Image (spheres, coloured by chain):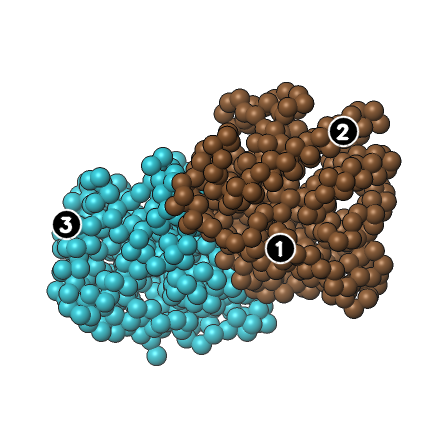
Chain colours: A brown, B cyan
Amino acid sequence: MNPIDWKVTASDGNARAGIITTRRSVIETPVFMPVGTQGAVKGIRFEWLEDELDARIILGNTYHLFLRPGVDTILKMGGLHKFTSWNRSLLTDSGGFQVFSLTDLRKLTEDGVEFRSHLDGSKQFLSPEVSMEIQAALGSEIVMVFDECPPGDGGFEATKKSLEMTARWAMRSKDRFNELQACGSDTGFVQSPSLSLPIATKEQAEACAISGKQALFGIIQGAGHLDLRRESLDRTVEIGFDGYAIGGLSVGEEKSVMYEVLDFLAPQMPNDTPRYLMGVGTPEDLIEAVNCGVDMFDCVIPTRNGRTGSAFTSHGKLNIRNAKFATDDKPLDPECGCSVCRRYSLGYLRHLYQAGEMTASIMISHHNVAFFLNTMRQAREAIRSATFQSFRRDFLYKLKQNDAS
Amino acid sequence: MNPIDWKVTASDGNARAGIITTRRSVIETPVFMPVGTQGAVKGIRFEWLEDELDARIILGNTYHLFLRPGVDTILKMGGLHKFTSWNRSLLTDSGGFQVFSLTDLRKLTEDGVEFRSHLDGSKQFLSPEVSMEIQAALGSEIVMVFDECPPGDGGFEATKKSLEMTARWAMRSKDRFNELQACGSDTGFVQSPSLSLPIATKEQAEACAISGKQALFGIIQGAGHLDLRRESLDRTVEIGFDGYAIGGLSVGEEKSVMYEVLDFLAPQMPNDTPRYLMGVGTPEDLIEAVNCGVDMFDCVIPTRNGRTGSAFTSHGKLNIRNAKFATDDKPLDPECGCSVCRRYSLGYLRHLYQAGEMTASIMISHHNVAFFLNTMRQAREAIRSATFQSFRRDFLYKLKQNDAS
């Protein structure tokens, strides 16, 4: 049995609708995965994510969880699902992206990356092997290979060199991942004494046992160089993974470069596995990437913007601080059916934001996540009914209305 | 018809269980009212307060709402219920307590208090009349008279002088309140052109119309001087109100002074109206006050402590930052059935708190409010079954366990 099951159920042009089945949940795609960096989606209790928003998968960050609370604690608590009580699917990143963001604090070798924790300055080390061990301890359903993330504006030679290291690291990631799966460490139960991480007791491992293995996704790099993207794709597919991700986009390059890469790359990615665009993006980006055939997304912007009072709506972004909303009794988005839009007015939410009330962040984040999940729901329906192009056109047209007003 | 209906349904010693029926909800007493200072209970969405926690009445602060968003905005939005979407009962304080806390920023005369806003330094004025007008605009079910709050450690003469002003202000409050009720301004519809506040349009007033009037509660002052408390009680009852509150406790005096005043005063307060102890207090305080015959409470500590990681439990307070909780898979309070205790572990909540996740504040505040509401529920049941004394003894004994450990 494969760790995940993947079926394309409908397609419309390059856009496709499908179903990913993990050991913990059934995920309809295209899917947006809310980000739970530190084991929680900022400001939104799991009860809302499960019951109303119906998120089937969320993301956890290996870098953050490795540093705090640490693998030892998570192992003692029976893995990330048991620790957090989130029982649906989890995808964990490899920690690579965060580590490479610490430009001044890291030292890169073939072996891995030495870096200083942003929390306490302590010296830490991540490598393909360590990242796989951490992600096994976390017990996520989808594990990401440890890759190097070159800058978006890197030249050809630098990008090519980085890509080659990424390919070697992908191989090392897969090897260690397979060892870990073979010894049953996929939910935090590490039997092999050769591993560098703390070992869960048998009782702890049994307490969190769940049938089925973890899946491993490869990552395609190559910045804005289409030929390097093609090369990275080939080399990654040659190694062979349960799914493929596009890394290194939305990292500072021009928007047109991202769209060009997506246009070129996504349709060439394997049909028989899910395609995941990492860390992207705005509602517009999501719809354009779906149009190229991408299935999975994650991004912090719904919750990050929610905390700064910026709401995504079907008519574009709005800033809740705007004085014109002070006595506006309409909802954030009249077309949204989320629990925030059904009940609370712009005027009230603006007041809460201006008054520094936490519930402003809570409720705008909630609406934003609802908007992203609903956008994906609409995209799925449009693909199934073969009306994706008209949906896309209308959606993008409406998004520009607030900008124009 | 009275603005509120009050029935004592059971008593046990001085403790009593009862039912307050307002135009918007049925409130079983003894009751704890969560504080919604600025039109929201900090960190807890109304959906939780209604569905799980079943709070029947919350408190709003006239001082804060007067300054932000301001009466004009609230009137335009149809009163505080419509503005916030909270449709159960509201009690609003008079603003007096907050204004008198601004020691350096205020000027007190017989007429009222001139003060500077803590938000922008602007000059503002509150008086019995203005407070009544604001509270009419807010449209709360229970309005508090505008009183002077003397320091808890004031001498006899100063306290007596203050108490006399409070009595005159209580009379003025009642007069203006009655005028406002007579002209139908109880939900923000102000018809009389002589009033100093913005006037709602007829449409606005009709949009928020609800049958039934507001109730007005008097406030008994007198600090720790029992004879002055007695005098204040007599003078306040002579004026005549729908309920009576004990003000000026838990404002810096010794705990023993508070208990002495409660012991002396509460049983002498009228039987045929509710008794409300303002701004108090800890779970222990609540049970001791119920024992003296108090029916209503409000306090910010469940949510304030929730935000600083301090949880109230049946075994006393615990500090979630304590390292001993890092891998503890027990809930905050094993005896609590709230949605936080049913699902989340001490270890996870500690991690969220240490990681600066908003959900830590959200969930600890939620549990704390649940604990306060459940404590009152247990007290009501104990009174009804005439077992209040044994409940009180056990409850207070258990509360001390964490302190001892």
Chain letter of disc 1 in the image:
A
Q: Residue at x 84, y 27 (%)?
A: A156
SS assignment at label 1: loop
Mark 2 residue type: Glu
Q: Which residue is mark 2?
A: A164
Left or right of residue B122: residue B390: left
Q: CA distance from mark 2 to mark 1?
A: 31 Å
Q: CA distance from mark 3 to mark 1?
A: 73 Å
Mark 2 or mark 1: which comes first in sequence? Answer: 1
Q: Which residue is mark 1?
A: A1
Mark 1 residue type: Met
Mark 3 residue type: Glu
Which quadrant of the figure contains the N terminus of chain A? Answer: bottom right
Give residue B241's position: percent from left, percent from top: 29, 66
Discs 2 and 1 carry the same chain letter? yes
Q: Which label lies toward us, 2 or 1?
A: 1
Q: Is residue B266 above or below residue B363?
A: below
Give residue B30's position: percent from left, percent from top: 26, 63
Asked if the residues shown at circle 2 and circle 3 are in contact, with their CB atoms under 8 angstroms apart, the answer is no
Q: Residues within 10 Å of mark 3 (few under 14, many from 20)?
A: few
Asked if the residues shown at circle 2 and circle 1 are in contact, with their CB atoms under 8 angstroms apart, the answer is no
Q: Nearer the viewer, residue A271 or A316?
A: A271
Q: Residues within 10 Å of mark 1 (few under 14, many from 20)?
A: few
Q: Which residue is mark 3?
A: B260
Q: Nearer the viewer, residue A278 or B309?
A: A278
Q: Which label lies toward us, 2 or 3?
A: 2
Q: Residue at x 79, y 28 (%)?
A: A159
Q: Is residue B393 above or below residue B210?
A: above
Chain letter of disc 3 in the image:
B
Give residue A200's position: percent from left, percent from top: 43, 39
Give residue B145's position: percent from left, percent from top: 34, 58
Name of the residue lying farthest toward the bottom: B1
